[in-house]
Image: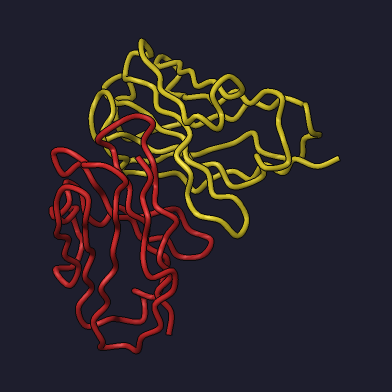
Chain colours: A red, B yellow
Amino acid sequence: IVLTQSPGTLSLSPGERATLSCRASQNIGPNLLAWYQQRPGQPPRLLIYEAFTRATGISDRFSGSGSGTDFTLSISRLEPEDFATYYCHQYGATPFTFGPGTKVDI
Amino acid sequence: QVHLVESGGGVVQPGGSLRLSCAVSGFTLSGYGMHWVRLAPGKGLEWLAVISHNGANEFYADSVKGRLTVSRDNSKNTVFLHMNTVRPEDTGVYYCARDVGSAWNYPDYWGQGTLVTVSS
């Protein structure tokens, strides 16, 4: 399953809302899609799994939605630490795959 | 506290071999599947492989099938990634990550990564 993320780069200011898209080449069922945040020099951090469930300790400013082939990660009220690269990841069919990432920068 | 530490990275010549290790602590390795993921310079994350909790099953990305092999020694709390016939495009930071379950789901905890550079 090929994942496409858009936009490639999102330039926003602190306090604004970010909307990131992830589209799959075929149905991901049942919503076996996760989102990760990665800052430079750090490993990925799990944000969302099963399309919309927040991982432990993740702020409610992060929310996931979507189903089938179209998924969205929303970040409300961007904080300085939110400026990073975000990846979607499907684990519904092997080989598992990541999207190419969306970089959220200032 | 869950902890994963990769080691074994370094510089290797094209066509050579390398074995990466992932030492874990803070959880019972035999209860979890384990993934390997890499981040190539200037590129995004690439999922490479997963091994089930008991080592009975493995899956690989098409790009590395036949050249990379994952194995584990639960008695030593260690997972391995064997890299053979390496290519320059194998250069990157290699992460091991714990699956949330015993087989294959999504990774939850990640190590800090180990850098592999393929160059002559």
B67 vs B51, left or right, is: right
In the displayed structure, does residue B21 sit left or right of residue B119? left
Above-or-below relation of A78 to A37 = below
Frontmost residue, A20 versus A54: A20
Quadrant location, the C terminus of chain A: bottom left
Quarter of the picture containing the N terminus of chain A is top left
> Is B103 situated above or below A63?
above
Image position, residue A60 (x, y; %): 14, 68
The part of the image, by quadrant, that contains residue A85 is bottom left
Q: How many circles with numbers are drawn on the protein?
A: 0
Viewer-proximal residue, A77 or B72? A77
**Residue at image location 46% in from the left, 26% down from the top:** B60
Q: Nearer the viewer, residue A97 or A106?
A: A97
Outermost residue on the right side: it is: B120
Taking B30 as reference, is B98 above or below it? below
Q: Position of residue B40 (x, y in %)?
A: 59, 50
- Please tell me which residue is depicted at 58% across the width and 47% down the height of the picture: B93
Q: Residue at the spot x=48%, y=18% of the render? A: B71
Residue B18 rendering spot, x and y as whole percentages: 68, 27
**Which residue is depicted at the point 16% across and 47% down?**
A68
Residue B55 placement: quadrant: top left
Position of B16 compared to B95: left or right? right
**Relative image position of residue B112 (x, y in whole percent):** 49, 48
The outermost residue toward the front is A25
Q: Residue furthest top?
A: B56
Does residue A40 appear left or right of residue A57 in this picture? Answer: right
